[in-house]
Image (cartoon, rainbow, N blue to C red):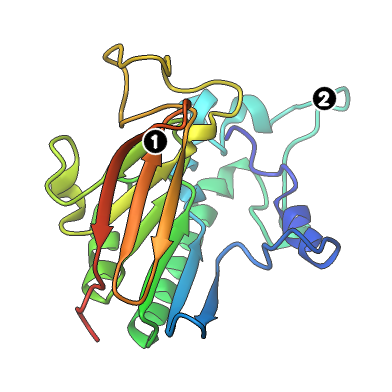
Amino acid sequence: GRVFSNGWDQQIAYTWKSSRWIMPAPYYSQHVEFPDQGFSMDILFIDSNAMDAKDPPEDSEHNMCSLKYNQNQGNDQRNAGCKDADGPEDVWSCKQWFWDFWANNTEWAKERMSESNADWQIVVTHFPCGHEPGFYRELYDLGLDLLVTGHRHDQELWAPGHARWGQELGDLYCLVTGGGGGITSEATPVENDGNWYGEAQYGFYGLGISKGEIEISSFDYTGAKVKTATLTPNTRHR
C-alpha cells in the first residue's frame, strides 16, 4: 500500500451493511463448530499492515506512510489523516501508530491462542510467510496449526524444512494464497522462469479438514494438482 487513509474504516462498517462481507474489526477471531464431523476450529484474523508502515521519506511505492502519496494530494493539496476514525493523525505519526497497533495485535493473538480449546487453530493475515517469523513461532508453541497469508501474487506452500524458507517458521506450515494474481502474477504461470517464489501462479488451494488431519492441495491454473501436504494437530500447549 501507499496511502494509510483509503477507507479502512468503511471496510469494517460494511460488515453491518452486507450479508456477505465479514470484517468486524482490524483483527478478530471466529470460533467454528463442525458438529457432524466432531471437531472445532478457532480462526484468528490478524492485521499485519505494519509491515508496510515505514518512515515517510522511505520507499514511496511500498510504504503506507509515504510523503509522496499522503502529503499535498488532489486539487486542494490535502494531507492524509485518520484522527476522526481513531487512526494515525498524520503522515509523521503513521509508522508509530501501525507498529503500536501491531504490538497490541500480537499480544491479543498470543492470549487468544493460549486460551483456545479447539481442535484446530488457524491464523489468517495479509503479509506473506516469512514476516515476523519469531512471533509466529511463538504462536506455534501455543498451538497454532496453520498460517494462511497472501500479498504476493502466487502460490507458496511452506512446509517444515522448506529449502528456501523452511527454517524461518520452524515446524509451522504456511500458505501464500495469492494465486489469483489481481492484475498480474509474480511471473509467468506457464513454467518456472526462475522468478517463482512457490509452486504455481494463478491457481488455488483446497483444504480437506477432519478432526485428525488437514490435507492441503495446491492446483495450478490448468486445474492440475501440483503440490500437497498433510497436517496433524499441533499438540503443543494442549
Q: Is residue 186 visible?
A: yes
Q: Give the residue at x 56% y 38%.
A: 65
Reading the image, the residue beneath label 2 is 74
Identify the image quadrant of the C terminus: bottom left
Quadrant of residue 205 within the rendered picture: top left
- Three-letter amino acid code at disc 2? Gly
Dot 2 or dot 1: first in sequence order is: 2
Q: Is residue 132 visible?
A: no
SS of the residue at dot 1?
strand
Which labelled disc corresponds to residue 155?
Answer: 1
Q: Nearer the viewer, residue 196 or 7?
A: 196
Quadrant of residue 189 within the rendered picture: top left
Bin the neighbour count of mark 1 within 10 Å (Cα to Cα): few under 14, some 14-19, many 20 and up: many
Determine the CA span between mark 2 and mark 1.
Answer: 37 Å
Image coordinates for residue 68, horizontal then vertical, percent:
62, 24
Image coordinates for residue 51, horizontal then vertical, percent:
43, 45
- Tell me if 111 is positioned left or right of 86 in this view: left
Image coordinates for residue 131, horizontal then vertical, percent:
33, 47
